[in-house]
Amino acid sequence: MTSSAALEVKQNLISSVGGEVTIPVPVKSRGFLLKQGRLIAIVKDSVFEIEDVDFLNRISWDRASGLFSIRRLQSKDSGDYSVDVNKTAVSFKLSVYDAVLEPSVTVASVSSERCTLLCAVDQLSGGTLSWYQGEVLVNQSSTHSTQRSLPLTVDRLGLRSSYRCVSANPAGNLTTSVDAKTSCTVQQRTGKNLALQATLIVILISVCLVPSVVFSSLRLLHLLCVYFIE
């Protein structure tokens, strides 16, 4: 179905997959809702009917407000819509984005001079990852990139600041904050502890190869070696 009504300026509507959107044009007793010229719902004499099976159980009309709503949105619902009422058609562009996922932050590498933090999400479509130092944007991915992670290298002085990673698209955003000083210090200590443990194991194994009768003082280390190896 195509409308011969006068067409008003298009408005933009934004939502996310699984969400809901309400068309902000009331139809009180008679009117039509179309998607790209195809009739999907009609109100006639205050009776509502769905004309497109793709929208069954997903589109509704509120008799009191006269507004159409579409719920459980899918990516394929994106497109141009229009409400035809009183010989006037108001056009809308609906953009349905993937739901924003909460980013995770890990320590990618650490040294005595700097620490690299890595912000990542499992999925990022049409959105961005951004690093903020306080309220200042310090790194951001491109909206056209398929990159699902974004690094941030912090020097020793920078460890005193607060940082947060934001995953965002036009439908919303989620933030993960990180204490860089605590995270990087813990990671560095963990690395040192692992190195120390590895060194001690090597020493113990070497001691185990020395006959215990040579140095009575090594007897205890020998027993410890046997304990760890077993």
Image: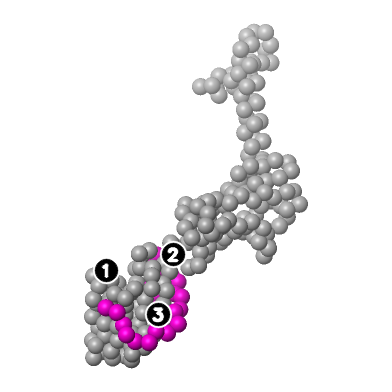
* Sooner in the amino-acid sequence: mark 2 or mark 1: 1
Helix, strand or loop at label 1? It is: helix
Give the label on residue 215, or none.
Answer: none
Residue at 63% over, 16% down: 206
**Structural distance between the alpha carbons of marks 2 and 1:** 18 Å
Residue type, mark 3 in image: Ser
In percent of width and height, residue 17 lies at 39, 65
- Disc 1: which residue: 54
Q: Quadrant of residue 186?
A: top right
In percent of width and height, residue 175 lies at 56, 61
Q: Is the image coloured rainbow, by chain, by secondary structure, or in one colour? A: one colour
- Which of these two is toward me, 169 or 153? 169
- Disc 3: which residue: 91
- Segment colored magenta: 1-23
* Sooner in the amino-acid sequence: mark 2 or mark 3: 3
- Which of these two is toward me, 132 or 39? 39
- Which of these two is toward me, 228 or 111? 111
**Structural distance between the alpha carbons of marks 2 and 3:** 20 Å
In percent of width and height, residue 210 lies at 64, 11
Q: Quadrant of residue 13?
A: bottom left
User: Overall secondary structure of the magenta stretch?
Assistant: strand
Q: Is residue 65 visible?
A: no
Choose mark 2 or mark 3, whichever is in front: 3
Choose mark 3 or mark 1, whichever is in front: 3
Residue type, mark 2 in image: Tyr
Residue 143 as seen in the image, left or right of residue 44: right
Q: Is residue 71 magenta?
A: no
Residue 63 as seen in the image, left or right of residue 139: left
Residue type, mark 1 in image: Asp
Helix, strand or loop at label 3? It is: strand
- Disc 2: which residue: 97
